[in-house]
Amino acid sequence: MSNRPHVIQILPMYYPKGEEVLNELAHVKKFEEFREDEIIEYLKSHRVDGIILRAPARVTSAMIDAAKDLKAVSGAGIGLDNIDVEYATQKGIKVLHAPKINSQATAEHTIGLIFSVMKNIVPFHEEMKKGNFGYRDGKFTYELKGKTLGLVGFGSIAQKSR
C-alpha cells in the first residue's frame, strides 16, 4: 500500500470535485449507505487514518473503538451532532467540520421560505393544481412592500441575511 492515508468515506460528497481530490490524495473506501455494523467490521480489519462523512451518517463510540489507528473525523457540514465529539476527543482523535460552508445558501433558503409563508405559495399552488380556484376566495397574503426582513441571531447564517 502507498503512503497515502486510508480514509473511509460514508455517503457521497455534495460536490463531485471534492471526491476527485480525496481520491487523488488518499486511499478511499466508500460506503454508499450508513450501515454501522458493516463499517465497524471494516474498521476492525483495516488500518484507517480518517473518516469523512455527511449526515445522516454518524460516527459513534463503537466505530471509534473499532478504528485503532484513527487520527481524524471530518463532517461535511456545519453540525457535529452526528459525531461523538466528546468520545473522539477523549481518544485523541481530531474532529473537523465546515462551519461556514453553506451559510449563504442557508440564509437565502430561509428568507425564501419566509417569503413563501407570507405569500401562502405552497397551499395556493397545491389547490390551483387541483383546479380549486375558489380556494383563494377570502384568503389574503401579506404585502412585502415596506417590510424589513432579517434573521435574528449572531451566527454566520443570520449575518449573511443582512
Image: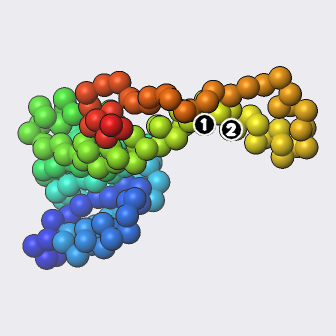
Quarter holding the N terminus is bottom left
In space, the residues marked 2 and 1 are separated at their CA atoms by 5 Å
Is residue 72 shown left or right of residue 53? Answer: left
Q: Are marks 2 and 1 in contact (CB under 8 Å)?
A: yes
**Residue 79 point in image, percent of width and height:** 31, 37
Is residue 129 shown left or right of residue 80? Answer: right
Q: Is residue 142 above or below residue 28?
A: above
Q: What element carries label 2?
A: helix
Q: Which residue is drawn at 91% across and 32% down?
A: 134
Q: Which residue is drawn at 49% across and 28% down?
A: 147
**Residue 25 point in image, percent of width and height:** 18, 72
Out of 47 and 118, give the one closest to the viewer: 118
Q: What element carries label 1?
A: helix
Out of 71 and 24, give the one closest to the viewer: 24
Tally the marks.
Answer: 2
Q: Quadrant of residue 65?
A: top left
Q: Is residue 2 visible?
A: yes
Q: Is residue 42 above or below residue 100?
A: below
Amino acid bearing label 1: Ser
Quarter holding the C terminus is top left
Disc 1: CA contacts within 10 A as few (<14), some (14-19) or many (>=20): some
Q: Mark 2 points at which residue?
A: 121
- Mark sitting on residue 116: 1
Q: Which residue is drawn at 56% across and 32% down?
A: 144
Q: Is residue 31 visible?
A: no
Disc 2: CA contacts within 10 A as few (<14), some (14-19) or many (>=20): few
Q: In which quarter of the image is residue 141?
A: top right
Tell me which label, 2 or 1, sits earlier in the chain: 1
**Residue 14 point in image, percent of width and height:** 40, 59
Amino acid bearing label 2: Ile
Is residue 89 shown left or right of residue 138? Answer: left
Q: In this view, does 16 lie above or below 149?
A: below
